Amino acid sequence: MTPSLLRLLLVTLAATQVGCVVVPQNRRRHLADPTMKMQDNALEDRARSKLYNSREASAGGNGRSAGGGCACGN
Amino acid sequence: MVVRRAAAVRAATSILILLSLASGNVWAAPSEPTQEEATVLDEEAILGDDEESGWSVSDLALRTTLYIQNGEGYQSQAGPLEGPGSEDTWIGRPEIKVGLRQSPNIQHDIFLSMDVVTAASPDALDLVTAASRVNEGTTLDINSSFRSDATTTYTTRVGGHHEEQFASFFCGAGYVGELYDANTVVSFNANLTMDGFDDLTIRGRDLGYLSRGNVNVNAGLTQVLSPTTLFDGSLGFTYQFGTLQNTWNSVPYATGDATSPTRRTNEVFPTRRFRFAARGRLSQHIPAIKGTAKAGYRFYVDSFDVKGHTLDVAYYQYLVEYLFVRASYRLYQQNAVDFFAPIVGADIPKYRTADSDLAALWGHEWGLKLVLLHSLIPPRDDHDDTIDVGIYRYQRTNGLSINYISLGYARKF
């Protein structure tokens, strides 16, 4: 395992440990704000992903396949 | 005196009780709901009728984006033989998403997008097709989800892509699970993509049909960290196999011949590629100023020796109750694939590419987006609809820039 990957895993682990406190549903009003959405807009996210995937060597990490599916991809 | 004080207390208490009764705020055991209240509080009305069925449109989204790209790359033949060629192009991308609710537990999201490209890859394709002058690509992607119980959802994905000399099919399946009262959401999915395309040489000959494919698995996590803080992250492995290069991409090479010092040959990649990416993001809402800040990082590595780092930050600020602005910045850095060279020597290596997308580069993107929550404008609408407009600039350090504008409309029914 590379040091970079190890660091990333440690940061992820540390971040998720805070989540041991369960926030009840009636205190999640702010999490439901439109600005807090995981995906701002599904169509916009797809368009931007395609822009990056077809002009950069890296892809993936967004729950989708890295590469393939288009003649423009790498 | 004591009698007068007791009378005053009794009078004040009586007034308070009368006011409470008038306002319905009674300090007593709750009474049985009226017929009207019973209808409002009916479980079926709140949770939905499990027996309810029938198709309906749950949401609709439209978007169109115009990209204006300027730049040059060695893979393009639209330029001098020994130098980089033009990558100038305009791209129009209309898209639509339709959400269809089959039943309370089954949802289908249909995405249809089209790319109209004025110069897909200015090269030999023009000799046999019109693909590099004007090309259209269409993608259909159908995402379905089935909620089997309160905490478990299964997903499927199927679709295809078509452009003039290229066709692709993809499918996938996944699982989404909610834990700890949905404070934690985990997801897993697996995908398969198969591409088929014409084996076009850099001089326009069609040598037949080629294919490539990839298998991909992903895991995701969303975690509520506080009433205003959210973490989401994912990681994914992809294995690609087959003809991974774009056969019509050219690579300049030095011949060593004084009369014709530079010629072009075709791009060749290894036939396998392992790719890994991991991403994490924190989102923090700041109620006091009605703002939200987000920061994310992605790490990428693959078997072509590419390492990529992406940092993206965004800040959202409400201007009024129904209008907010998003300012975003994305920083990207990659090193070149291990067989990249803008011009190779006379002893042409087995694997080679001059594709500027695979060179060492830094990329910056700035964006500004205005989102109007139309349904919140008084008097409020029953529907949840939004209108947005965004302008962006993507700039690479190796000579490519894109300005684009995106307009979107979405409505939930």
Image (cartoon, coloured by chain):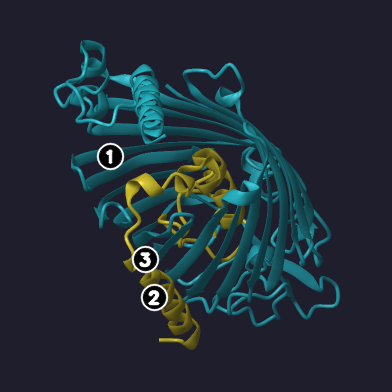
Chain colours: A yellow, B cyan
Q: Quadrant of the C terminus of chain A?
A: bottom right
Identified at 34% across, 24% down, the residue is B17
On screen, residue B214 above or below B350: above
Label at residue A19: 3
Which subunit holds the residue at mark 2? A
Categorize mark 3 by other alpha carbons within 10 Å: few (<14), some (14-19), many (20+).
Answer: many
Instruction: Report the mark closest to the observer, 1 or 3.
Output: 3
C-alpha gap between disc 2 and disc 3: 10 Å
Tell me the kind of residue under disc 3. Gly
Q: Quadrant of residue B252?
A: bottom right
Residue that carries the numbered disc 1 in the rendered image: B145
Q: Is residue B313 visible?
A: yes
The three-letter code of the residue at mark 1 reads: Ser
Q: Nearer the viewer, residue B303 or B258?
A: B303
The residue identified by callout 2 is: A13
**Residue B408 at x, y percent in the picture:** 61, 31
Quadrant in the picture for the N terminus of chain A: bottom left
Mark 1 and mark 3: Cα distance apart in space = 26 Å
> Residue B183's spot in the image, x, y percent?
33, 56
Q: Mark 2, mark 3: which one is toward the viewer?
A: 3
Q: Residue at x 64, y 55 (%)?
A: B314
SS of the residue under disc 3: helix
Q: Secondary structure at mark 2?
A: helix
Report the side of B383 relative to B373 (left or right): left
Vertical comparison of B43 with B182: above or below: above
Sequence-wise, which precedes: disc 2 or disc 3?
A: 2
- Residue A5 rendering spot, x and y as whole percentages: 45, 80
